[in-house]
Amino acid sequence: MTLTAPIDGVDNAAVHGLIFLFKWQRQSSSATASLEGRGTPLTGDAVPEGLFFAQQTVQNACATQAILSVLFNARDAIVAQEGAESKDQEDDNGRRLVLGQTLSNFKEFTCHFPPDLRGEAIGSSDEIRTAHNSFGRSEDAFLSDPTKPKRIATDDDDVFHFIAYVPHENGCVYELDGLQQGPIQVGECKKDEADKDQWIKVARDAIQARLSNYSPTEIKFNLMAIVQDRRTYLNERLDALAAIGVEENDPAMVQIQSELHAEEEKRAQWALENARRHHNYLPFCVELLRSLAGSGKMDGLMNKAKTRAAEKRQRQQKS
């Protein structure tokens, strides 16, 4: 697999950091990080001042931790102050990331913690836990036995992991992986005001090097970016056109309004998908099966399903 453009779909928007999802391999441990060409995890005084890194101490929290790694390392982020409104500060038309009061307090509280204690603090935060769980699936009360320990993943299981890539004010780009002992420097970029996002090219090369450790047929990857809300950029364009006297029925205004409407619909769909993902459908499925069995329709439906499955296998074998 090859990465082409640094990031598609984020033109004219500030990119605060990248999040990479990949299938975790046993050789991805910190002991062999340098063998993969990613450098050695930095610890102690070798960690740049101001770079926030936390070790992952809670299971299944790597996605949330990767997001926090980007938020706490965003360049020129506006940190909320007690008793002050962060919106009063100049946010460069939405291009500067604004940390709310909760995350601002957490960052300040843990700024002098070692990585392991930062990880413990993340796991102990009620606000972060609530936000994390709001996107998780409900526990299966019917299938989960709390008295039995959870099965440990084996080499045959697909285990996925999230990591973050962020730029730092020292001109370097770092990989932040909570399973490592510290941040990993993956490259340097020149401080060019005309191309503030050239660090993405450095991160892209590091991710491409990671991909080379997998089979050419492996496709289970996902690259995401935490970016400026595109609605902010579109509203800025609308205001600029209105300021020079462009009417609302002008094609340019209509196009931007259409894009803005699409962004709103996209977020409504995200909310619906999250509600469906979080809902526990198992009681409904169990009750449906009971109803079908009670009405005598279960056997007929099962036989039809078996027939369709057999026909599908035959078609696949012929092709």
Image: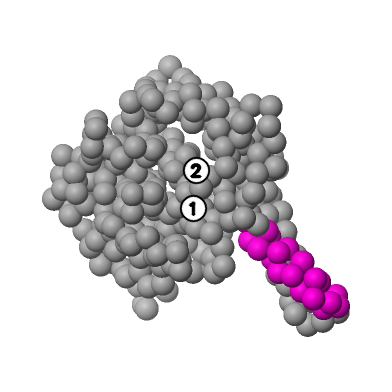
Mainly helix, strand or loop, the magenta region?
Answer: helix
Which quadrant of the figure has residue 48?
A: top left
Q: List the residue tagged with mark 2.
A: 71
Residue segment shown in magenta: 229-248
- Name the image quarter holding the C terminus: bottom left
Instruction: Identify which amino acid the numbered label 2 is placed on.
Output: Leu
Instruction: Identify which amino acid the numbered label 1 is placed on.
Output: His
Residue at position x 49%, y 31% from top?
107
Q: List the residue tagged with mark 1.
A: 16
Residue at position x 48%, y 24% from top?
109
Residue 293 visible, this orientation:
no
Residue at position x 45%, y 52% from top?
17
Relative to 222, is 9 on the left or the right? right
Residue at position x 24%, y 32% from top?
45
Secondary structure at badge 1 equals strand
Secondary structure at badge 2 equals helix
Is residue 17 on the magenta stretch? no
Q: Residue furthest bottom?
A: 251
Question: Marks 1/2: CA distance?
Answer: 8 Å
